[in-house]
Image (cartoon, rainbow, N blue to C red):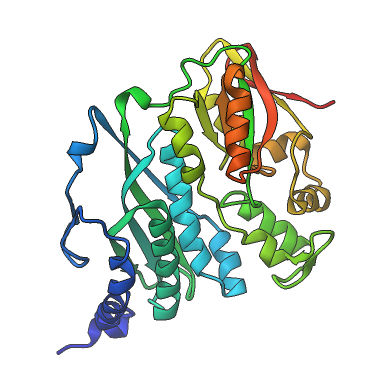
Amino acid sequence: MSKKYKQAGVDIEVQNRVLKKIKKTVGRTHSENVLGGIGGFGACFRFPVEQFEKPVLVSSCDGVGTKILVALQAQELEGVGYDLVNHCVNDCLVQGATHPLFFLDYFGCDTLDPEQFQAVIKGVARGCEENGLSLVGGETAEMGGFFPQGVFDLVGFIVAVCEKDRLLTGRDLQPGDVILGLPSTGLHTNGFTLARKICFEQEKMAVDSPLPGAGMTVGEALLKPHLSYLKILKPLIEEGKVKALAHITGGGFLDNIPRVLPPDVNAFIRLGSWDTPPIFRFLQDKGKIPGEEMLKVFNLGIGMCVFVSPVILSEVGKYLKAHDQKFFVIGNVQPGEARVVFDLS
């Protein structure tokens, strides 16, 4: 048999061997609704129609950006697979989709490194298991000459379901509603191009360099996992106690919160009302980044904004405390024109 394709940089047999090795890992994520295993042209999933009255499918597609480059430097690749799933889960959750169904991944590289790939998929599978998702398939693409050697890209695709009458749109938000902030662990999966420039190019740091005042290395701070807020928020959403959610990802507060605001209200955010992880203070100080830009690029320690009625604020607070979920009251809804307004006092 001709070896021309292998000589050109694509080894089909390596791909096949790697896929066989991950079958068991992937299989652990499968629910009874998955029909067949991995390896088909398409994945078959039986929709659990009996569990819903008026189901609406909610889908999302996202990546983890240049966090991959930090993970490669630190040789900690499982985490980016895990981050990918949690990011996608949250993007569906903000629509009210508390039932993730299935997940697919795309892994593109120059030449497939089996150890890299298996570590990433292990993280994807862990994220799927924790969120009740079935990892039903994906695409592994070797593209010689397209990616730098040793570097890869990672993308995730998710489908979740929501009852139509539980869709969260923010249309019922009104002045007086309260905004709660659920903490992030750090950057999650956004702002890494700027963070890497400051840490590794400007400050000449390495991933094992201590981060001043943090009790951890730069790599540890940057690679903190992107949290999933599904388990803690699912009961509140299904009981109708959440009026809107905003996942604070790329675009920070300034771009993400307005997505859920009706045209006649503003979101008033009190800066300083939550704990900001040291990595953000370090980046702003060393990068000399203006405050407004920080609010547009980074999450600054808030991964999810939860909008609730003031009438049930105490009840929601007791629930979160009972489940050891830290939260901050970071603002409220006021009359306005669908903007975010910050209190700098």
Residue in view at x 41 percent, y 52 percent: 131
Query: Can you give x and y, in whole percent of width and height, for residue 80 in the image?
Result: 51, 62
Residue in view at x 64 percent, y 52 percent: 185
Q: Foreground residue, 39 or 318?
A: 318
In terms of image quadrants, where is residue 343?
A: top right
- Any part of residue 25 in sight: yes
Q: Foreground residue, 177 or 341?
A: 177
From the image, which quarter does the N terminus lie in? bottom left
From the image, which quarter does the C terminus lie in? top right
When the figure is inspected, residue 69 is found, relative to residue 251, above or below; the finding is below
Query: Can you give x and y, in whole percent of width and height, for residue 87 in the image?
Result: 48, 48
When the figure is inspected, residue 36 is found, relative to residue 118, above or below; the finding is above
When the figure is inspected, residue 286 is found, relative to residue 15, above or below; the finding is above
Query: Can you give x and y, in whole percent of width and height, for residue 63 in the image?
Result: 46, 53
2 relative position to 139: left or right? left
Query: Can you give x and y, in whole percent of width and height, for residue 127 in the image?
Result: 43, 58
Residue in view at x 77 percent, y 61 percent: 202
285 relative position to 42: left or right? right
